[in-house]
Image (cartoon, coloured by chain):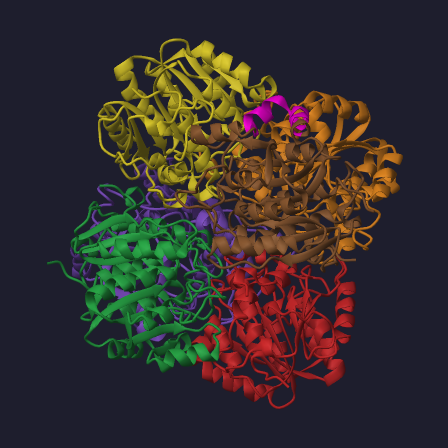
Chain colours: A brown, B yellow, C orange, D green, E red, F purple
C-alpha cells in the first residue's frame, strides 16, 4: 500500500484503463483556442496527478466514492497539432465512441463544443450548467471563426443545448453589451460572481436546479470560474471569482439531475502553484462523480 | 484584430500616449521607500500588461468602459536612483504638469505623498479613501524621515488631506498604540479588515460615502489591502485581507463622489504568481475609471 | 533601528535565545512522516523569517504583544535522520526539558505526538483544539505504524488527550467511514470546513469553547486547515479550507482557556509563494501568544 | 536619465517606433506551431524588456552600438488566432511591407518560413546560418503539414534558401535517420553541439563563413540552440547545448557576411527564470546588430 | 500521431508496461534518506514526463534507439512510508524479481544499495561507474546507520562492488579526510569535477574504461554530478559540476562494457525549473540504453 | 548531530557569533544602489542558509576548512532605510569596528565602497581582485552621485585602491568607451569573460597574481561575474559569464597573497532558483577562507 505520492497518476489512481466503463475519464490536451495564455495542453496530466490526494477515503459529504464506481481512465484523445477544426472533428469522433458517460479533462474550453456535439447526438438538446468567468458566446474569437470564447455561441446556434435550460455561474469579465444581450435573449440565465457572493450557495443551487429541470443535462466547469487566487493556473483569469468551497458545496447539492457528462477545462499548469489549480479541477470532477452510486 | 496576448502593453491597450487627455495613466517605478521586500519598480509594466485582459468589452456592472473615455497612457515618471527626497520632488513636478486627472501606477506607497501634494495644490485639502493593511501614519520609517509607512502622517501634517474626510479600509497590521491613537485623534476613520469581513460590502460603502462626503476626494489603493492569497506580489503582506470581489464591489458603489485622482501601489511582480496581483491592481484602476462617463 | 528585512530571523526577531523563558519557541525540522509532499523540514526557518513582519507594533485586536512577553527562541530540536521512532523519542525528551510553555514550529504533524506526550506528563489528559483538513486518526499511515495521519489515533489511545474535550476544525478530506465513526465514537467533535463557512466565526468559537471547557488545553494548528490559496506551501492540501481571517478571528476569541502549549505544523516552503504560508503560520502563533499578558 | 528598470520596454529602449528605418525590430507572437510547450507568444515582450540591460553603453568587442543605428521597434505583427496557415500569410505580408532590414522576435520557429518567403522575394535564394537543437527539416510535424519542425523542409523545397549555403549549428536532438540523410543530401552542413564543444569557437566560425560565402544570407537563431541551463524558457529543450559565450563569440566573428535579416525565436517566458532566456535572446539580436555601423 | 506534449508519460512513451522485457524501467519514489532537501519521491514521474522529448527519432550519435529495444516501463516499486530499512528490503525484493536488466529512476541515492544487492546476487561483485558530487562512502549519515551518503560504504563492505573496479566521477563536495582516505584505500578511483573540466572528456573515458575493465559493471548516476545550473532540481547541490554535454559524451563512449544495470537518482522536481533536471536524467538513461542494440 | 537541513543558519553553521574573531562574517542588507532589479537585501540570509551544505567536511583541494578557523558570524550591519549616503557612513563605521578580517555578504556592490574605506584606513591603498560583469567605474549612476556602478570610480579617486594593482575579471557588459578608457588609463587590468573562457584558468591566475603582487589586497566578488545560468539570482545579469568551476579554481590558486578582506555581493534571492546563486556565493567565501590555516 503506497502513500499518495507513490500512487499511479491515472485519475484517482484507478487501475482500470480500457473501454466500456460506466464512467470514462479522458484527457483532451488541446489548447490553441485560447485567446491569452496557453498551457492547458498539460492540464490532463496535472489533474490526474493531483487527483491522487482524493483516492484514499470516501467523500465525507455523501459518503460515496468515485473509486467505487465502474470508472476507467482511458487516456488522452488524439488531436491535430495546430489545427482547431481538425482537432474538433477528432475529439467529437473519439467522444462519440465512448460507451458510457464521459468525464473530460481539458484542454481549453474549445473542446466542449465537440463534446456537446457527441452528447447531443445521443440525448438531444441538453441542459447546461456552465461555470465560467466569461459568457463564451462571442460570435467570433478576435476575428477568427472558432476559439474558446465562441463555444456556446455555436452550441446554441447548432441546437446542442437548450438555452432556456442553460445557466452560467460566476460570470464577471468585461463583455460587449450586444453579446450579453444576445445570450440573455436566447433564454440563458446568467449569475454573476458578485451575485453568488452576495446571495450565497443555497440561492445559487436553487437557481441552477430551477433552470436545469428534469431533462438531460451537461456540466461544464471552466476553472476560471474560480477566483485566480484559488485557480491561478489558467489562461484568462478574472478577479472576484467563486470560492472552491462554494463550487464544491454547489455541485454537492446537484444530485438527481439527469447528468449526461461533465468536463473541467482551462487548467494551465505552467501558471499553477503547488498544484492547487489542478487539485481544484480534480476535486470538481470528484464531486461530480460523487453524485452517483455504484450499480 | 489581435487576441489579448498580442495587444500592446499600454494601460488597457490604449493607443493614446501623449499629454492632454482627460485621464492620464502614468507609472511611477520608485520602490526604495519600502521597509521590507522591494520590486514595485516593476509594478507599472506588470499592471499595464495585465490590464489587457480588460480591454475587450465593457464593465458588466456599469455598462461603461474606460476605453471609451479620453484616456492616455503617458508612460513612466522620471525618478532619481537611490534618493527618496529628490524622487519625490520629481514626481510632484511631473504630476503637477499633467493637465487632466492622473491615475498613477506605483511604485511603493511613498509616491502617494507627492501625488497628493500636486493634487492638493489644485483642489485644496482632499478627502481620502485609503485601502491598505497598514495605517501608514508612522511619524518615521524605522528611524528615517520618509518611507512608505509615513506617507499619511506627512499628508495630514501638511494639510494635504482633511483627516475628518479620510477613511482607511482593511487595516490589520500590528501597530504601536500611539500611532493608532494619533491617527484616530486626527479624525481619521479606520475600518479593520475583520470589520469589513463581518459587516459586509454595503456597510463599508455606507461608511466610505459618509466620510468622504461631497468634497474633492482622492482614492489610494495599496494592493496589500487585499489578502496575500489574492495579492502575493507585494512587499509587506498581512494575512486576513480584503477579497478582490469585495474591493471591486465597494469601488463600483462609489460613483458620484468628486474624484480627483487615484493610485494603485505596492505591486511587486517578483513575488507575484501568474500575474494575479497585477491583474487585481489593473482591475481596481479599471473599476475606478468605470465610474466616469465619456464627455 | 533596522527595517523588517534586516531584522534577525528569530521568531519575532527576539534577542532572547536561551532556556528558562515563560514561552519558548522551538523549531522541529522533521518531515518524513508525510504521506505526500515533503519539505516541512524547512518550515521553522521560513516561519521565523516571515514572523519579522509582526514584530513592529502590537496586536491591534488585543493591544497586547508577544514581544512584550518573556519569550525565547530556543532554536531547533535535534532529530534522527530517516527514523521516525527515534526522532519522536528525541523530540519528546527535548520538549520535556523545556521549563515554560512550548510553542513549536513544525515539521509535519507527526511531531505533535511527542509534544503531547511531554505536555500530558505534566498536565494529564489535555483538551485539544485541532485545526486541520484531515482527522489524522487513521490507525496506520498507508500500512505503516506511524505517520502524520495517525497522530491523534495514538494520542487518544495513549490517553494524552481527552477526546470529549477534543474538537477538530476545518475537516474536509476524503476519509474512510470507519475512521470517521471511530473518531466521533471516541467523543471527538468534528466541524467541517463547510460548517465553518456556513455558520460563521462566532458559532465556531462557541463550539470550541464549549468543547474545550476549563481544563488544560493544547492548540495544534495544521496549516492545511487553511485554504490552499492561502497556504499553498503544505504537503497534503485540500480545497475549500478555512480563511486566514476566520482562523485569526477564532483564535483571538479563545482567551481564558487554560492553554498549555501550541504548535503550527505542515508548512512546506518549497511549495510556498512569496512567504504567504509561512506568514500565515507565524501569525497563528502570534495570535496565540497575543492571548497572554506579561507577568 | 532613468535607470535600467525604468527604461521604456521597446527593443533597446529605442524611442523610434515608426516605419522606414534601416533596421526594424518586430515581434511575432505566434506559437501554435510548437510540438511541445507553448508560451513563445510572450517572447517579444520579454525580449524587449530584457534588452534594456544592453542599451547603456556600447558593445565592448566591436565598440559599435545598435542604438547608434537607424533602428525602430515597429511593434508586433498581427496574427490569426489558432490558424497557422492564415497567420503565415499575414506575417509574410507584413514582413514584405517593411522597408529596411527586419530583425524579428518570435514566436515559435514556424514564423521563420514567411520571413524567408518575404526575404527571398527581394534577394533570391538565401544562405542560412541556423542555430538550433533540431534540424527542423521534418516533412511534417506529427502528421500535420506545418509546424515548427518543418520550416526548413519547406524553405528548401520552395527554394527560399540555397541548401549548399545553409549550415546548422548546435544540432543534437533525436532524429529519424531519413530526415537527417535528406537534409545532408540537400547539401546542408550540420554541426552538432558536441562538435562545437570539442572543436571550439574558431573552428565553428570558419565553417560558417565557409558555407555562407559571399551571397545574401539570413541568420535564424532558435534559442534552444543554447543549453537548457542558459535558455530554460523554451518549448523543446535538449541538453548538451551551446553556451551563450560561444554563441556570442561566434556571431561577433560573422561580420562582413551579406546579412539580409535575422530572427531569434522560441523564447517561452512562462518557463524562463529571472529573464535569463530573454536576455540571451536580446543579446543575440544585439550582437547581430553590432555587426553593422551607422550610415 | 500525437505531438510530444500529448504522448503518454511512460518512459519514452513506451506502450509496454508488463514484466519480462529485456530492459525494465522502474521508478523508486523513496527519498527519506536525503540529508538536505527532499522531493526525489517525485523524480520518477518527472523523468518519465521529460523523456517524451526523446522518443521521436533515434540517437544521432549511435543511430540506435531505446524505443527499438525490448523495453518496458513497469511502474513504481512499493516502498514503506517513513522506514528506510523496510523500504530497502522491499526494493531489493522487487528488483530481484525483475527478469531482465533494470533501469531505475530514483528516488534518493539510498535506493542504489538494494539495487546493487539484487544485481550482485546474480552477477557477483560488480564494477561501478559512479557519477556524483559526493563520495557517498560515509560510514554513517549524520549519526544514523543508513542514508544517501553511506550507500557505497555499505556496498563496499558487503562486497557488492569491487572497489578496484569502482570509479567516482565529478566528486567535489567537502569531505572528511578520513572518509576520502578510506575510499581511496579500498582501491576506488576518484576523479574530481575539476579534473574532468581540466583534462577533458576523452581522458575521463579512458580512466573509466580502464577501471571498469571487462567484468560485470553497474552505472549509477547521481544527478548532482552535474552542475547545479543544469540540474537545480536535486537535494544536495555543489557548484562546479560536470556539464550535461560532457556526461552525455562520456556515456556515449562507454559501449562494450558488460553493463548489468543502471540508475539515475536524486532528481527532486520541486526544485527543478522547466523540467531541465528531469530531462537531463531522462537523457542519461536514454544514452545508456542507446549503448545496446535490439536482439 | 543534525543533518544539513537542520543546521543553524549562521555562516557555515558556526556557533561563534560575537566580536573579536580572526575572521568575522557580516551581512550587509543594503540594495538601493542597484540600477535594475533589487532584492540583495535578502542576500546575507540566503548565503548563510546555503553555506550549510559546506560545513560537513573539509575543502578537498586544500584539505583545510574554514570551520577550523577562528571564525564568527557577527550578524548584519545596521543600515539607513532609503538613504545611500547615511547607509555608507554606518557601514564604514561598523566595518571599522571589527577587530579581525571582515568577510562581508552583500547587499549590492555599493557596500564595497565603505568596506574599502575602512580597510584602506588600516592598510593603505589596496590591491584589488575584482570579479564582475561590469567595470563599475562609471562616474555617476544614471545621473546620481552614488550607485552600484560607481563604486570603483570613487575607490580609485579616493586612493583606496592602487589601480595598478587592480584587476577586473569576467567583464562583459556594454560600456561607454570613455569609461573603459578612463579605467584602463588609471592602470587597471581588465580581463573579459571571453578572455577567461579562451585562455583558461591558469592564464587568469597568472594575470591576477602578477597584478596583485605582494601588497595588501582585497577580494570583491560580484556574483554577476558568473554566468546567469549559474547565478540567476542577481540584479544586472549579463550572458556569457564565468563558470563557477573556473571561479572556484581561480580562487583556490590565489593563496599567499596578502589578503585583507573579502566580500561577495549582488545575490538577489527573489530571482534565485533552488538556492544555486546563494550556494555559489557561499562557496566563493568558503574558498577564500580555505586559503588560510588556523593559528
Magenta stretch, residue numbers: A188-208
Picture residue at 69% right of the left edge, 43% below the top: A260
Residue located farthest toward the left when viewing the structure as drawn: D295
Count the numbered circles shown: 0
Q: Main secondary structure of the magenta part?
A: helix
* D177 relative position to B9: left or right: right
Residue C175: image quadrant is top right
Looking at the picture, how far across and down is residue E48, in whole percent? 60, 65
Residue at the image position 43 percent from the left and 81 percent from the top: E199
Q: Is residue F155 highlighted in magenta?
A: no
Q: Quadrant of the C terminus of chain D?
A: bottom left
Q: Nearer the viewer, residue B171 or A235?
A: A235
> Along the horizontal axis of the image, is B175 left or right of C120?
left
Q: Could you say which quadrant of the image residue F191 lies in?
A: bottom left
Q: Residue D293's image quarter?
A: bottom left
Residue F241, position in %: x, y?
A: 35, 63
Q: Position of residue E137 (x, y in %)?
A: 64, 72
User: Can see residue E122?
Assistant: yes
In-front residue for pair D116/C284: D116
Reply above or below: C152 against B226: below
* Residue lying at 70% horizontally and 28% vertically, measured from the top left: C196
Q: Is residue E132 left or right of residue D166?
A: right
Image vertical order of residue F147 relative to residue E155, above or below: above
Which residue sits at x=87%, y=32%? C187
Amino acid at each position: 500500500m503506497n502513500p499518495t505520492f507513490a500512487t499511479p497518476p491515472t485519475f484517482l489512481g484507478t487501475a482500470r484503463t480500457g473501454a466500456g466503463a460506466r464512467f470514462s475519464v479522458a484527457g483532451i490536451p488541446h489548447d490553441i483556442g485560447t485567446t491569452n495564455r496557453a498551457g492547458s495542453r498539460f492540464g490532463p496530466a496535472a489533474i490526474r496527478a493531483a487527483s491522487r490526494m482524493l483516492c484514499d477515503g470516501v467523500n465525507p459529504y455523501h459518503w460515496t466514492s468515485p473509486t467505487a464506481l465502474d470508472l476507467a481512465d482511458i487516456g488522452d484523445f488524439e488531436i491535430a497539432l495546430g489545427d482547431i477544426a481538425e482537432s474538433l472533428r477528432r475529439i467529437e469522433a473519439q467522444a462519440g465512441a465512448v460507451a458510457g458517460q464521459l468525464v473530460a479533462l481539458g484542454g481549453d474550453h474549445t473542446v466542449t463544443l465537440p463534446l456537446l456535439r457527441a452528447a447531443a447526438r445521443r440525448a438531444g438538446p441538453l441542459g447546461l450548467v456552465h461555470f465560467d468567468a466569461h459568457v463564451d458566446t462571442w460570435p467570433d474569437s478576435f476575428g477568427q471563426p472558432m476559439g474558446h470564447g465562441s463555444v456556446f455561441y455555436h452550441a446554441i446556434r447548432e441546437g446542442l443545448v437548450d438555452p432556456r435550460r442553460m445557466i452560467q455561474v460566476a460570470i464577471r469579465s468585461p463583455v460587449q453589451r450586444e453579446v450579453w444581450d444576445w445570450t440573455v435573449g436566447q433564454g440563458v440565465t446568467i449569475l454573476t460572481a458578485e451575485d453568488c457572493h452576495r446571495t450565497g450557495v443555497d440561492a445559487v443551487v436553487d437557481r441552477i436546479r430551477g433552470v436545469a429541470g428534469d431533462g438531460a443535462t451537461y456540466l461544464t466547469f471552466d476553472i476560471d470560474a474560480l477566483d485566480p487566487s484559488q485557480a491561478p493556473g489558467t489562461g484568462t483569469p478574472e478577479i472576484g471569482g467563486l470560492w472552491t468551497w462554494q463550487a464544491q458545496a454547489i455541485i454537492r447539492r446537484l444530485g438527481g439531475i439527469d447528468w449526461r457528462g461533465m468536463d473541467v477545462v482551462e487548467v494551465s499548469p505552467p501558471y499553477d502553484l503547488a498544484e492547487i489549480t489542478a487539485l481544484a479541477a480534480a476535486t470538481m470532477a470528484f464531486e461530480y462523480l460523487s453524485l452517483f452510486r455504484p450499480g
